[in-house]
Amino acid sequence: MLCQHALILLPLFVATLELAIPFFSKTSGLIYLSLVTFIFIVAPKRCAIGDWRKILPSALISALGAVATFALANHLDLGPLVASAIVGLVGTFFLAEDDQLKIYLGAFVGMTSVARFPSLGLVVVAGLVGGVLWQVLNETWNGVGGRLGTIAAAAVLVVVLTLGGGL
């Protein structure tokens, strides 16, 4: 369980790496690739994730929420708050309780600025990463406020920093 608590600190770790990049400019890509490899290969094995069959549905539901929110916010000019609220509200009518959390997590990912994600493909990838992180951190910090937002921030940071761009 300690391993899963450590993963929730991912946004702080990534932001620290971003601040340190001027000192490691030639190795920044390698640092980010190592980070992503650790998160998605090593950490789940070390954390003893129970059922791997739950990861794909979680990732897809989160990606759906991210794309829907991003499209409503940026292409229909509703803004990120209204778009996120619409996606969350629609999710409550059509999804089971656990899946409602996943789509709302994706809605947080989709609230990202178009300046950070100029293409919809990056939004999809960030939504998928968010769903994977959700499944890895599923039983971590239950009942603590900010868990979904922290996981969404981690997913967005990982995608922005590994696929280009920056803070």
Image (cartoon, grey):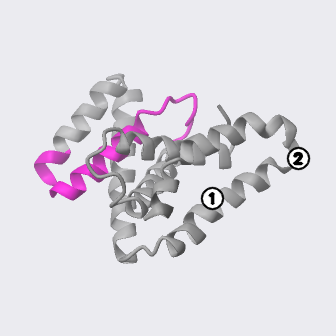
Number of dots carrying numbers? 2
In percent of width and height, residue 3 lies at 50, 63
**Residue 111 picture quarter:** top left
Give above or below for 44 relative to 35.
below
Residue at position x 79%, y 39% from top?
A: 21
Disc 2 element: helix
Q: Amino acid at mark 1?
A: Val
Q: Nearer the viewer, residue 143 or 125?
A: 143
Distance of mark 2 from mark 1, alpha carbons?
A: 18 Å
Residue at position x 46%, y 55% from top?
A: 5
Which residue has dot 2 on it? 26
**Residue 13 picture quarter:** top right
In percent of width and height, residue 12 lies at 58, 40
Q: Are marks 2 and 1 in contact (CB under 8 Å)?
A: no
Q: Amino acid at mark 2?
A: Lys
Residue at position x 53%, y 47% from top?
A: 9
Which residue has dot 1 on it? 36
Q: Main secondary structure of the magenta part?
A: helix
Which portion, as a residue range, is magenta? 91-120
Specify whether residue 102 is painted magenta. yes
Q: Is residue 104 left or right of residue 23?
A: left
In percent of width and height, residue 72 lies at 33, 32
Lower sequence index among marks 2 and 1: 2
Give above or below for 83 relative to 136.
above
Quarter in which the N terminus is drawn: bottom left
Residue at position x 29%, y 52% from top?
A: 142
Tell me the number on the disc at residue 115.
none
Disc 1 element: helix
Badge 1, how many Cα within 10 Å: few under 14, some, many 20+?
some
Specify whether residue 3 is painted magenta. no
